[in-house]
Image (spheres, rainbow, N blue to C red):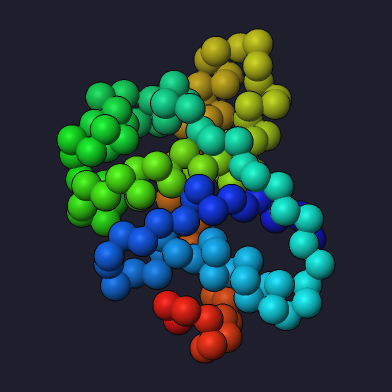
Amino acid sequence: MKVFFTHKMVAQAGEDSPSPRKPALVVAAWKQAGIPLDIEAPYPVPVDDFALAHDRQHVEDILALKKPNGFGNHDQEVAASLPFTSGTSPFWRDCRKSSPGSRIARSFCIRLALILIWMMPMAAISLPSSLPGV
């Protein structure tokens, strides 16, 4: 199974939410289950692309730890993980490939892709209780 993963997308936000740790936990669970994985590191979303979906200053402030992130903190690990986590989106990867020549088409496609990342519900995955943090 093709999986986009890098440890750069994992963070310890100090929150009750397992979300910043989920990518590593899921990959570990799949490996433990013996699922053959073809792991590829995601290409990080550049600030210019985030700025197509969000106010550029807002993006830069979160990444520079001047504004709280989605967990309500200023954690460097979380900020550093955001471009890689967002880079796993198949919508974003397809937009980058399919609309390189038209700024308007690319802008619309990337805005939609980055918004969809946050709207999509996480799939329920049963993780073994022996994994740390579960």
Q: Quadrant of residue 64?
A: top left
Q: Measuring from the top left, give residue 41's x and y in whole percent.
A: 65, 45
Q: Quadrant of residue 11?
A: bottom left
Q: Measuring from the top left, give residue 61's x and y in whole percent.
A: 24, 31
Left or right position of 126 against 83: right
Q: Measuring from the top left, give residue 21's x and y in whole percent.
A: 45, 64
Left or right position of 71 against 100: left
Q: Is residue 54 above or below residue 85?
A: above
Whether residue 130 is visible here, answered yes or no, is yes
In the rendered image, the residue lying farthest to the bottom is 129
Whether residue 52 is visible here, answered yes or no, is no
Q: Quadrant of the C terminus?
A: bottom left
Q: Quadrant of the N terminus?
A: bottom right
Image point (27%, 65%), residue name: 14
Q: Quadrant of residue 20?
A: bottom left
Q: How many marks?
A: 0
Q: Which sits in the foreground, 74 or 93?
A: 74
Image point (54%, 87%), residue name: 130
Q: Measuring from the top left, give residue 13's x and y in whole percent.
A: 31, 60
Q: Which sits in the foreground, 88 or 129?
A: 129
Q: Is residue 34 above or below residue 52?
A: below
Image point (35%, 50%), residue name: 78
Q: Is residue 105 above or below residue 88?
A: above
Left or right position of 118 against 33: left
